[in-house]
Image (tube, rainbow, N blue to C red):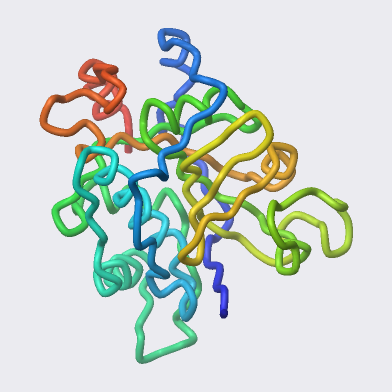
């Protein structure tokens, strides 16, 4: 199986809301959370042929949101590719234009242009190594949209990704940048969706290679009730996020 990457280095924007502003008001997330039970048919979303991981991750987040609200929706691969074209300038007729995309460019575009009717209302950044904030993003928001600087060692590790070295093939970014959603966690590992399947990584691995992370607020996750599947009312947070997010 061919595995493409495609996440460009993070670009910071001081206007982006910090999730930590709100987490003080939230109850601690449970030690374990799994949003995958109702998700089926993950799909590759063209990330085996082009570097559209930043957009494929969006499609997987929508899958998780809709599955947990009762009826999973699978974004067509063609719509994921169109999103990548719009955000990055990729032209299928010109392979050299496949240069990847910046995560916040994808998120900002998604906020303004719902993907096949599925909206991103707002997003907030999570500070590096904020374990509790990542847990809260998965538990309260359904997923954490993250960027990792993959090491070459990840190419050949079967099972859970773990840190073997931070030098040579283990150096952050020695393979390249990749965008994935975190959709489950326990005390020892996190679970990504990538390349049409689930991939576990140790928390230590995540801290070694994570270079950006966001909590996403989507209408699909709120559902018709305006509450998350766990009953947390996000109305006030939603308004604040909409005001300050770029």
Q: Nearer the viewer, residue 14 or 91?
A: 91
Q: Residue at x 38, y 77 (%)?
A: 90
Q: Nearer the viewer, residue 42 or 128?
A: 42
Q: Residue furthest left?
A: 224
Say which quadrant the N terminus sits in: bottom right
Q: Residue at x 47, y 48 (%)?
A: 181
Seen in the picture, residue 47 relative to 101 is either above or below; the reply is below
Please state the horizontal and vertical placement of residue 69, each as a whole percent of the image. Answer: 22, 38
Q: Nearer the viewer, residue 13 or 131?
A: 131
Answer with left or right where residue 99 lies relative to residue 119: right
Please state the horizontal and vertical placement of residue 13, each as a whole percent of the image. Answer: 46, 39
Answer with left or right where residue 92 lies relative to residue 34: left
Say which quadrant the C terminus sits in: top left
Q: Nearer the viewer, residue 83 or 132?
A: 132
Answer with left or right where residue 129 lies relative to residue 50: right
Please state the horizontal and vertical placement of residue 222, each as a whole percent of the image. Answer: 21, 31
Answer with left or right where residue 227 lies relative to residue 37: left
Seen in the picture, residue 166 relative to 56 is either above or below; the reply is above
Please state the horizontal and vertical placement of residue 242, each as a whole percent of the image. Answer: 25, 29
Q: Residue furthest front?
A: 37
Total marks drawn? 0
Seen in the picture, residue 59 relative to 243 is either above or below; the reply is below
Q: Residue at x 56, y 35 (%)?
A: 185
Q: Residue at x 20, y 41 (%)?
A: 70
């Amino acid at each position: 199986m061919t595995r493409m990457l495609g996440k460009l280095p993070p670009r910071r924007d001081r206007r982006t809301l910090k999730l930590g502003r709100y987490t003080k008001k939230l109850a601690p997330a449970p030690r374990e959370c799994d949003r995958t039970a109702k998700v089926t048919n993950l799909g590759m979303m063209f990330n085996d042929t082009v570097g559209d991981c930043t957009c494929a991750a969006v499609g997987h987040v929508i899958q998780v949101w809709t599955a947990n609200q009762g009826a999973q929706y699978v974004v067509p691969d063609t719509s994921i590719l169109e999103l990548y074209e719009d955000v990055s300038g990729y032209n299928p007729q010109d392979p050299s234009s496949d240069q990847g995309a910046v995560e916040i460019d994808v998120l900002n575009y998604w906020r303004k242009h719902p993907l096949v009717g599925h909206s991103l209302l707002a997003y907030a950044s999570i500070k590096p190594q904020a374990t509790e904030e990542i847990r809260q993003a998965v538990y309260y928001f359904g997923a954490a949209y993250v960027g990792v600087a993959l090491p070459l060692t990840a190419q050949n590790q079967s099972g859970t990704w773990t840190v073997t070295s931070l030098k040579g093939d283990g150096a952050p970014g020695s393979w390249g940048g990749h965008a994935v959603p975190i959709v489950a966690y326990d005390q020892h590992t996190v679970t990504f969706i990538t390349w049409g399947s689930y991939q576990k990584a140790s928390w230590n691995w995540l801290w070694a290679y994570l270079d950006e992370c966001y909590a996403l607020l989507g209408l699909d996750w709120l559902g018709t009730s305006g509450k998350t599947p766990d009953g947390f009312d996000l109305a006030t947070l939603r308004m604040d996020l909409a005001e300050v997010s770029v």
